[in-house]
Amino acid sequence: MDILKERIKSDGVAVGTEILKVDSFLNHRIDVRLFEEIGAEFRRRFSDVADKTDKILTVEASGIAVAAFVSRYFGYPPAVFAKKEMPNTMDEDYYFSEIMSFTKMKMSSIRIAKKYLRAGERVLIIDDFLAHGQAALGLVNLVAQAGAEILGVGIVIEKSFQGGGRKLRAKGLRVESLAIVEKVEDGNILFAP
Ligand code: 5GP
């Protein structure tokens, strides 16, 4: 997706060789017009399954806005986000998965109330970044626990050098990434062709 790559090049900041900071349009301030384009692009890429998507699934926080725009372009299926903390209000039964955050260097857990993810539902997983694949694999695990079906995984920015995409594809999952970063070096962000 060229406009996304251009935006990453112009506004993205490389932090060392591992992290990409895109707070100005994706993770802190949201460029709503760009999010519209992102929603439309996911619709094009998953056009064969868009009409049978029952649910868009993501994880808080930055995935939520992306998932909401994807829902809009998929005919408004509900967007459900896994929670990272256990809120007092979450007294229902839930599915639970442990994940490692390499950006924060700590284990955390994600959970979804069972009533929001049902057996047989067809789910599209969406997230802002794919790095080591922990967040996405955690969501895949929650879907498996529910007995639901994954139609695909849609990612805004994949960092291919961290291997998450490889792990997901090796599981036979269909992964569509709108921008694939191959390397972050000397402040330069290099994309896959
Ligand atoms: P993974 O679980 O695939 O290792 O990492 C994915 C999650 O970590 C994403 O949901 C995202 O929140 C965060 N993340 C990983 N790498 C980056 C990065 O380079 N920049 C930002 N802003 N977030 C990242």
Image (tube, rainbow, N blue to C red):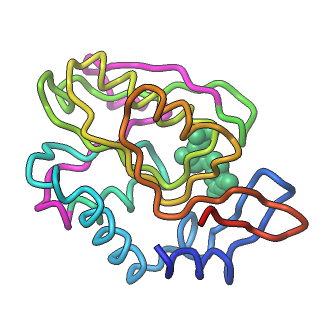
Question: What span is in magenta?
Answer: 72-100
Q: Nearer the viewer, residue 51 or 190?
A: 190
Q: Height in image: 78 above or below 115?
A: below
Q: Is residue 169 magenta?
A: no
Give left or right: position of 48 versus 191: left
Q: Height in image: 172 above or below 34?
A: above
Q: How many marks?
A: 0
Residue found at x 38% / y 51%: 154
Q: Horizontal and vertical percent for residue 150?
A: 27, 34
Q: Height in image: 6 above or below 43?
A: below
Q: Height in image: 144 above or below 76?
A: above
Residue 35 location, quadrant = bottom left
Residue found at x 30% / y 61%: 45
Q: Quadrant of the C terminus?
A: bottom right
Q: Horizontal and vertical percent for residue 27?
A: 56, 63
Q: Nearer the viewer, residue 57 or 114?
A: 57
Residue found at x 48% / y 33%: 168
Q: Is residue 95 magenta?
A: yes
Give left or right: position of 25 versus 56: right
Please, which residue is most extreme toward the right here? Answer: 186
Q: Horizontal and vertical percent for residue 174?
A: 36, 41
Residue found at x 71% / y 36%: 102
Q: Nearer the viewer, residue 4 or 92?
A: 4
Residue 37 location, quadrant = bottom left
Please, which residue is most extreme toward the front here? Answer: 193
